[in-house]
Image: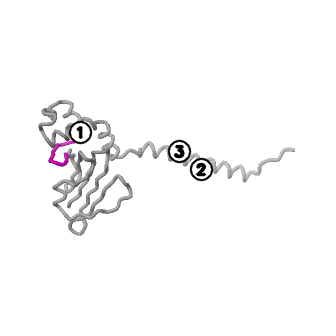
Amino acid sequence: MRKSIPPAVKSMTQLGLYLVLMILMWIVIAQLVFPNNGARDDYKAFIEKHAPLLTQVAENAMDETVWPGLMDTQEVRDVLAEGGVTSVTGDGTSASFWLKAEDPNATLRYAWFPDGRYVMSEEVQSAAVWELVKSENRDVTHYVGGTAGQCSVSARQLNDHFYLEEALIP
């Protein structure tokens, strides 16, 4: 004689299966609507894709006798436009690829350092007294300072020589 499954067990099993299917469905929808690739990943992907050329541009920005005429090439102009770079500046210790920031009180730049050690830009350093804040991410250096601690600077390491610096100085 065959035992039948009680109706309560059948309906609880069906309810559990429907719940699992609904959860899976919402996970798929969430991945489609909110993909896990933010703007920061785009910054890193841009640097990884164009690191050799951007290194040459940085060296040229620091000393125009290195790679002369590089900034006038169409390839460099196209790459800088692709990355949203509005200007490139350099000094004796680093080069800055300035990006357009959405906030008028903020600056955003790719910073290139020949030795790979991050240093704030002169504009940011002179704006406030900075205190290093411990960050959960070891690739991010974060500082706060300024009037009532309202200013902040975050520098995320993108590769051995490039950093993404976001400075907010209201």
Of marks 1 and 2, which one's residue comes earlier in the chain? 2
Q: Which residues are magenta?
A: 84-95
Q: Which mark is residue 19?
A: 2
User: Badge 3, how many Cα within 10 Å: few under 14, some, many 20+?
Assistant: few
- Say which label, 3 or 2, has the lower sequence index: 2
- Describe residue 34's horizontal placement relative to residue 74 as left or right: right
In the picture of the structure, the residue carrying the numbered disc 3 is: 25
Tell me where residue 147 appears, x and y as whole percent: 20, 68
Most foreground residue, 65 or 103: 65
Mark 1 — residue? 55
In x, y percent, where is residue 83?
Answer: 25, 40
- Packing grade of label 2 (10 A; few <14, some 14-19, many >=20) is few
Q: Amino acid at mark 1?
A: Thr
Check if mark 1's residue and mark 2's residue have beta carbons within 8 Å. no
Secondary structure found at label 2: helix
Mark 1 residue crowding within 10 angstroms, few (<14) / some (14–19) / many (20+): some
Q: CA distance from mark 3 to mark 2?
A: 10 Å
Tag 3: amino acid = Met
Q: What amino acid type should be assigned to the residue bearing mark 2? A: Leu
